[in-house]
Amino acid sequence: MTEHAVGIHKLCRNFGQIKALDNVSFTVKRQSIFGLLGPNGAGKTTLFSIAANFIHADSGQVEILGVDVQQIAQLQGRLSILPQDALFQRNVPILEQLVFFRLLDGRTRSEAVGEVKKTLEMVGLGEFMNRRVHSLSHGMIKRLGVAQAFLGNPEVILLDEPTSGLDPANARQIRDLIRELQSRATILISSHNLAEIQELCDHVAILDQGKLVAAGSVAEITRAGRKIDVRLSRPLLYHEITRLSAPQGIRHITDSGAGRYTFHINVSALEAGENEAEAMDQIIRQFLRDLLDMDLIPREFREGTSLEEHFLKVTGKGGD
Amino acid sequence: MSFRELQLRHLRLISLYGARYVIRGGAGLVYIMLVLSCGLITAHIILLPVEQEAKEKTGVELTDKEMLDHLVEVARPAVQWMLGGKTKNERPVMERSAGNEKEDPEIRWAAYLLDEKPALLSAVILIMFYFTPFLVALGSFNQYSGDIQSKGLRYQLLRTSRTNIYFGRFLAAVFYTVFVNAILIIIIVLYLGLKLDIYAWSALARWGLWGILALIAVSIPYIAFCGWISSMIDSPFGSMTISSIVISAIPLFALFGRATWKPASSICYALPWGIQNYILHPDWTWVLGSLAACGGYTILFLLLGHHHFTKRDL
Amino acid sequence: MSEGKRPGGLTALAVINFIFAAMGLLGILGLATFLAFSQMEDGGNPDMQKMKEEFAKSGLTVTIVVLLLAISVLTTLLEILSGIGYLLQKKFLGRLLGNMYAVVAIGTSLAMAIWGPQTQGGGFTVGTIFGLVYPVLTLLLLNTTFKEDFIN
């Protein structure tokens, strides 16, 4: 059994003159939640579509659970997807549609109905199961798509923007469901909600104009910025800024206004042969002591670069 | 993708699901209305003189049987023409003067349909043969194109093979066509049996059943053709337009083309237009040949459509 | 099968309603003209006299023509209103009036079959069956397939 659930190898796909995917390669570990990020038109949906064999790659290979997706029949029941812009049949009750899908998966009718009802309850659509799709809101349709992706026990689930268009409560519910599934499935998520990806995912890959521009664990990527963002109970006075800048670990301070400050870490202090995590702990410990001595209470505290900042940096849409 | 991926269970599920919900999409409703309207109006026009008008015009009280015989003689040249026979003036002079009319195959064929079989039912079936290709185009144009356009097939593609989807939906269209044509012929057979005291029930039932099978045999190649077009074009409207234009253009081109260049009429063999009438032939070899040709057309269009469907982006 | 919020079948039903309503309007026009001519004085005109004789022979009385006209107006109106109701998915305008149209149309067809003058399309013919097909389909579809689609 391969260690990786998904393997993308030198994937290329053009649409006319446009390079939708340009030599993209990465792997996804089993039972992990993997985030696929990128601006609009980066190639995320194209990559998912090739992985599900909806469209064919010009070159390269995609393997899921050790199976080339060209032999997609071998993955029936093991792979599922929430496609971004696929429409359900608008005139058929949603229960019937999902029961049809489970029947195709090999279930008997009674088993299928039971499983579908349970899944619809799970995503909050239990009372609408006899409605037609055309009478559902956008958010409900999105939840229906998530429900069909969760049906059965797929080993790999591809979710293309699962929470887009959902209100915060429903989005939270879907995120909770995704976390619950991690123990039995490998999940790939594409999303524009970087905070959500940062919260959910172990690893991410960032695409830009068809190219892979960054890949790695979320912790590694966000730690790379080496800074501390705080919001304080009140603005800093001049002498307080001087005192907080004094320690060797702090390079300089940026004032963002309204009590928000960014303390940029002195990277050389970390590189002098010390254990990086311990060195950061020491800097943060000193920093917090200094704040409390000055009777300053941090209301918000975040270490490292946010995924959003890193994303903007690597896609050339923002600086450090 | 290969035929090895065909699964009977999936074919059954997809075809029954498709046939069950076709009317909700609108195309099924339009199709059933068109078929029943065409068929019943045709039957009404054919039967009306027997039931009413001719009695007044002749001024003589005739029985239904006598009226039928009269009408059959009036209709015979038209039926012969529809069967592809030449009119008197088109036949060579020698043939005409030698009085070889009884040897003319189309005359024998017309006699078989009008004299040996229930004439009224034969006429309805024959006229429906001409309407069927156009009706099928209007009923089967959206086997795939709508769901390709909406990407709705993507929910099924990881649960079953493209081959199963292609043939399952084809079968759904066939089942629905069988259902609609059966309703039409059964209505007409029941009417002829109950209202007009001309034909025996056994003759009506036998010929009615054959009529249903014949209409289905004629419909199936066109359903396969429309499926091929539908698999190539993302737009349902585009699929309907192209299917209808091609199906209509071929016989028209054959009809008018042969006036300037005789071989132009061979274009009708691009679709079953050229052979479909032989399903009603008195000679069984012609019937079997026509059925085999319909089967051949069906297989050809299915293979073309399947090949395209399995290779294209969905 | 990509569609908007309304089922395609309901849209198709509405369109067919409008087509039959258009044909009904032509029928109303014909009946009204027929009635008008039958009531006119012939003034010694031989053509007019011949027409009045044909009318008398046809078995149609003024009462029957007026009744047919009234029923045609009713069914045409019901077709138009229910067609609009189908498009708007209204319960009263669509489903109720649609059912009313179907019942009136079925009743009219059967009445013509039983009591209609033979020379004027009466009696049970294939035309009767044709006249029943669409109303029966409408009745079936409105109360089964599209029952849940009238949401307004």
Image: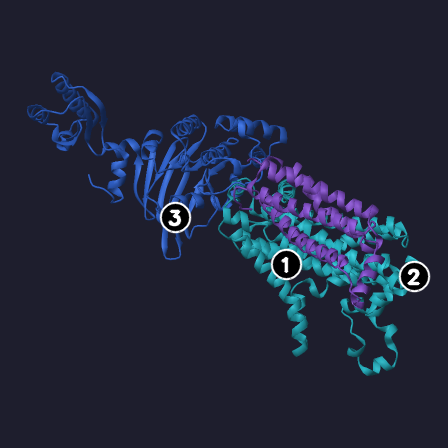
Chain colours: A blue, B cyan, C purple
Question: Left or right: where does residue A180 sit relative to residue B12?
Answer: left
Kindly identify the amino acid type of the residue bearing the numbered disc 2.
Glu
Which chain letter matches label 3? A
- Name the residue carrying label 3: A11
Q: Secondary structure at mark 1?
A: helix
Q: The residue tagged with tag 3: helix, strand or loop?
A: strand
Q: Chain of mark 2?
A: B
Q: Report if residue B170 is visible in the image.
A: no
User: Which residue is label 1 attached to?
Assistant: B300
**Alpha carbon distance from label 2 to label 1:** 47 Å
Residue type of the residue flagged with mark 1: Leu
Residue B121 x, y percent position in the rendering: 82, 56
Q: Amino acid at mark 3?
A: Leu
User: Horizontal placement of B281 versus B172: left or right?
Assistant: right
| Residue at which label 2 appears | B66
Crowding around mark 2 (Cα neighbors within 10 Å: few <14, some 14 to 19, many 20+) is few
Give the spatial CA distance, label 2 vs label 3: 79 Å
Residue in the foreground of this view, choosing between B31 and A231 = B31
x and y percentages locating residue C81 in the rendered image: 61, 44
Question: Which label sits in the foreground, 1 or 3?
Answer: 1
Dot 3, how many residues are within 10 Å of its Cα: few (below 14), some (14-19), or many (20+)? many
Q: Position of residue B144 (x, y in %)?
A: 57, 50
Q: Which mark is residue A64?
A: none
Q: Is residue B165 above or below residue C50?
A: above
The residue at 88%/81% (across/down) is B98
The percent position of residue A122, horizontal first and vertical second, equals 49, 26
Q: Earlier in the sequence, mark 2 or mark 1?
A: 2
Whether label 2 touches label 1, CB < 8 Å: no
